[in-house]
Image (cartoon, helix red, strand yellow):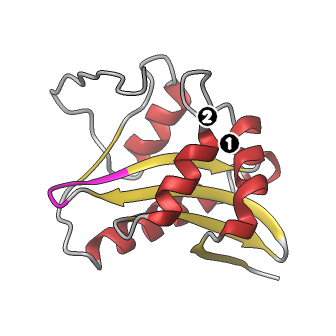
Amino acid sequence: MGVSIEAASVADRDAVIALWHVAGLTRPWNDPARDFDTALSNPTSATLIARDGNDLSGTAMVGFDGHRGWVYYLAVANGQRGSGLGRALMAAAEDWLKARGCVAIRLMVRGDNEGARGFYSAIGYEQQDVITLGKRLDG
């Protein structure tokens, strides 16, 4: 069977979150279940999933804030890494954003994640001269 990419549903929640954990994308200060639920319930965001048959192979959370598109939680299952699935998920995320009128996309990569930085560079993303500022609103 070939890999298909589609929007996640509530039924995918546990498998998606498990993949995020295995891929090392979760952090103690972020609740991945809340992130998944929020993306699913908002018309300006989605979690795209890649399936190989019935098996979850990858994810990309995508959102459009009206000005820029954002991508989070790009994850590819260990057995699928290097297969082009990450590229396919990013292409699907870009298509999702273009369909909503988005003309610019951003994503954040931790400074020490050389592998991710190399991957994004290879698919046309470039480091930009911006500083990300943040503030927690949940306490």
User: Which segment is the magenta one?
Assistant: 66-70
Q: Residue at x 62, y 31 (%)?
A: 26
Q: Is residue 131 above or below residue 120?
A: above
Q: Which mark is residue 115?
A: none
Quarter holding residue 120? top left
Viewer-side residue, 107 vs 125: 107
Mark 2 surroundings: few (<14), some (14-19) or many (≥20) residues within 10 A = some
- The amino acid sitting under disc 2 is Leu
Name the main secondary structure of what is drawn in magenta. Answer: loop
* Image point (71%, 47%), residue name: 17
Residue 46 is at least partly visible in this image: no
Please say if 116 is above or below 4: above
Residue 20: which disc?
Answer: 1
Label 2: which secondary element: loop
Say left or right for 25 vs 72. Answer: right
Residues at discs 1 and 2 in contact (Cβ within 8 Å): yes
Q: Is residue 22 left or right of residue 113?
A: right
Q: Specify whether residue 114 is painted magenta.
A: no
Name the amino acid type tagged 1: Trp
Give the crowd class for mark 1: few <14, some 14-19, many >=20 residues within 10 Å: many
Q: Is residue 57 visible?
A: yes
Where does residue 125 sit, x and y in percent of width and height? 32, 46
Q: CA distance from mark 1 to mark 2?
A: 5 Å
- Tell me the residue that label 2 is attached to: 25
Badge 1 marks a residue whose secondary structure is helix
- Residue that appears at 55% across and 22% down: 29
User: Which image quarter is the C terminus in?
Assistant: top left
Lower position in the chain sequence, tag 1 or tag 2: 1
> Looking at the image, which is closer to me, 7 or 11?
11
